[in-house]
Amino acid sequence: MSQKRLPETPAPTVGVVAALAVLVAVVAPYFLIDAPEVGVYYSAPTFLPIHLVVGLFAMVAVVVFAAGRNGRTDPPTAAGATVVLGGFMTLLVLWWAVEVGGLVGSLTSVAAFDYHRWLLLATAFAVAATAGWFANDVL
């Protein structure tokens, strides 16, 4: 019985970088504004702070992308799992970014902070897009 050789693809490595970028984007407000304001910012429309869920999904995505790249997990399974993680992250951050829009201007006068929610959305979308690329390459 012969083993089917999967194509070498840079997609999981790019996925690891994208998921790490999500983690950096989640932590960035702690360096831009005061910690109590960050708590209000992340928990505004929900009972559970959004950064905990998105950060957890991003950490799991790093592990799954790396496992798929290194052959510790079946690459099609890893690709499917990261598509789901990236999709949920993107939808969750999109919903949160729209809902928190009115609150952003009242927290701080730091101009760079006004665009943080869209940066977080872009990084979450990058994880989903890279997961789709990975799935396309291995399926």
Image: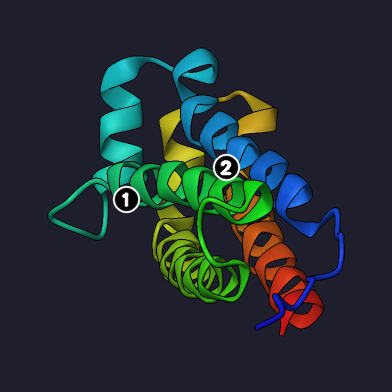
Q: Check the picture and name the quadrant holding the N terminus.
A: bottom right
Q: Check the picture and name the quadrant holding the C terminus.
A: bottom right
**Disc assigned to residue 50:** 1
In terms of image quadrants, where is residue 34? top left
Furthest-left residue in this view: 47
Seen at 40% across and 50% down, the residue is 54
At mark 1, the secondary structure is helix
Closer to the camera, 104 or 139? 139
Residue 43 drawn at (x, y percent): 25, 46
Which class describes the residues within 10 Å of circle 1: few (<14), some (14-19), or many (20+)? many
Decide: is 17 above or below 30: below
Apparent side of residue 109 relative to residue 57 in the rendered image (left or right): right
Seen at 78% across and 72% down, the residue is 133
Decide: is 118 above or below 63: below
Seen at 48% across and 35% down, the residue is 26
Which residue type does callout 1 highlight?
Ile
Residue 138 drawn at (x, y percent): 74, 76
Residue 122 drawn at (x, y percent): 69, 56
Q: CA distance from mark 2 to mark 1?
A: 12 Å
Q: Is residue 19 visible?
A: yes
Apparent side of residue 20 relative to residue 44 in the rendered image (left or right): right
Q: Is residue 118 visible?
A: no
Furthest-front residue in this view: 1
Closer to the camera, 48 or 2? 2
At mark 2, the secondary structure is helix
Closer to the camera, 110 or 59? 59
Residue 4 drawn at (x, y percent): 74, 78
Residue that label 2 marks: 22
